[in-house]
Structure formats: C-alpha cells, structure tokens
Image (cartoon, rainbow, N blue to C red):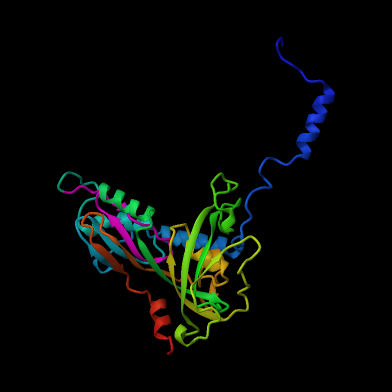
Amino acid sequence: MAGTLIPSSNKLVQHTEETLTQPPPNTLDFPIPLTRHPPPISKQVELDRAMAASAKSGFSITKSDVIYEDQWLIAINKPSGVYCDHVLASIPRLLGVSPESSGAENPLELHLGNRLDRDTSGVMLITKLHKVAGKLVQAFTEHRVKKTYIALCIGLAPQWEEIALKSGHGRSKFGAWRVYSASDIGRTLPGGSVVREMVTSFKVLSVNGLSSENIDFIEKRNEMLIVRDEGSKISSTHDAKDEILIRAYPQSGRTHQIRLHCQYLGIPLRGDVKYEGPHEWKEKTYDYHALHAENLSFDHPVTGSLMEFHAPLPSWAREALSCTKG
C-alpha cells in the first residue's frame, strides 16, 4: 500500500470518539414547526378519501360546471372529492374532441391554470394553449391573480374581526406541511428545501350564525400578525363549540396555505382531519373539509380584459350564510 498514510491507533481512537460525541451537522439547527403533526386519525381518513377520489378517475365535468369559456381558457366549478388531474382529463369529453386529436385546427394543449386540493371545491382554470398557460403561470407567480375563499371553521370564536397572518411555510422532517416562524423564512429544512413566506388575510363573516356586524370584537382593525417562535395562537378545539364562517384572501400560493393558517389560529376547518379539524361534528361525519374557492380575478392573458369568476357556493356554505342572523 505504498503512498497510503495509515494513522496511528491512538489518533484513530481519538477521531472516532470525537465523531460519536459530535452531532451530525445541521441536525440541531433546523427550524422548529409551530403547528402540530397530523393526528393519528388522519392517516386512515386521508387514505379512505384518497381511495374514494382515485375511484373517480372516469369523472366527467358537465356543462353545468362551466363558469366561463373562450378560445383560450375555461373556468370550471370543481366539486370536492375530485383530483384536479381527473378534471383536466375530462375536458376533451366536455369539448367533444378526442384526447388523441391534434393539428392546427384542434391542438389540445390543455394545462391546469391553478390547482385546488382534492377536497376543496370552487374556481379552477384550464388553459387551451401552451403560450396562454405560460402567461397565466407568470401572473400567478407575480401575484397578479386575486383569490378569495370561504371556509367553515370549528374552534373558539376569535377576538378579531379581520386579521392578516404572515408566517413561514415548509415541510417538517416527517414530510408534513407545517407553519414556521416568519423569522425562519429562508432557512433550510431537513429535506433540503427552505422555509418560504406565507401570507393570508381573514375576515369573520359569522359566529354561530350571528353576523359579524352584530358581534363586539375586541380587535376590529385588520392587523398584521407576524408569527414568531415564542408565540402561537393554537388552542385546543376539543371543548370548543363555535362555528366560524370566514372569508380568506391568500396573498401567496403555498400548499394547504389557508388550512395551515386556520390550524395555527386555533380554528381548523370542519372535516380537515389532517390539520386538527373535527371529522365528526354535531353527530355527523364529514367526508371533505369545508373550503371553497369562491372568486378568482386577473387580467386575461390574451385580451388584457379584467376577468372575474365566481363559483356557486356549495350547500354547506349556502346553509351557513342563510342561517346568519342580523
């Protein structure tokens, strides 16, 4: 073994001891998530919901689901419990063309303009041309698309009427999406990704059927809450009995953004077992979380005209609004 340096046994032992006593680099320096890991019940419930959605691979969008259509894009009112990819796959049938067709007269260049969670209903965009898809992606990236959602939450009635929440967003070492402190934005996570900024504004519409106009909130103004390491708004919902109808305005486009921020605020969505929302509520079991993409507005990627799409409310949202008193 000419040319190879072999360390003495003493130095080797010393080096081994140092290696064993020193922690692996960065393992103790990862950001700490501020929301809890999914509860045990969520694993089976999520599996059941995923299997039910996968069984709908032959799902078809109907004309009644179409909110708007032109030669460049189509807006759909996506139902809950359906994957976006299944909606996309059904568009050729809706348009009356074969998925295999191509050519100048009928180029099928369908793309998802935006994605909604499997169990979230509401406005979903599909573009018909590659160049249109690119422009729409750029509009989303540059935050030129305005979105509003409506959600039914379960928890302790908030003391604020309006609030804006700024935090970090990323995957924990278990692979689950979690809320992080705003001061952690840019820091590296266990999987190699980084914590990214997440901002959502919320407005309370009603609490237990009582309109927000008749509620004496302690905080009326729309204050910006910066999420910090030392302060969490999480509260136990096991004994909470309040139903809070809210409207959410995401200013960033992070995965599960509204659901995560509602969990952090202690008002998780009804049915959202992944983020501590009740699976059963008032002696009824819910198959989906109560979140609906209500409005979407942006400048048309081709004509430049202002487009605003409104998806009809699902039954749970209509019922919640119809029960609102005063």
Please indicate, yes or no, whether residue 289 appears anywhere in the rendered image: no
With respect to residue 320, does 61 lie above or below? above
With respect to residue 291, does 110 lie above or below? above
* Left or right side of 294 for 282: right
If the image is split into quadrants, where does the N terminus sit?
A: top right
* Left or right side of 279 for 11: right
If the image is split into quadrants, where does the C terminus sit?
A: bottom left
Decide whether the magenta segment is chiefly helix, strand or loop: loop
Quick one: 266 or 289, which is closer to the camera? 266
Residue segment shown in magenta: 106-129
Q: Position of residue 320 (x, y in %)?
A: 43, 81
Point out the residue furthest to the left here. Answer: 105
Quick one: 65 or 235, which is closer to the camera? 235
Q: What residue sits 58% from the left and 78% below the top?
A: 156
Q: Position of residue 106 (x, y in %)?
A: 18, 49
Quadrant position of residue 311:
bottom left
Q: Is residue 210 magenta?
A: no
Q: What residue sits 48% from the left and 62% below the top?
A: 199
Please indicate, yes or no, whether residue 31 appears anywhere in the rendered image: yes
Point out the residue furthest to the right here. Answer: 10
All told, the count of numbered labels is: 0
Q: Position of residue 73 (x, y in %)?
A: 25, 57
With respect to residue 227, does 187 lie above or below? above
Point out the residue furthest to the top here. Answer: 2
Q: Position of residue 213 (x, y in %)?
A: 45, 85
Q: What residue sits 66% from the left and 47% below the top?
A: 29
Quadrant position of residue 225:
bottom right
Q: Is residue 110 magenta?
A: yes
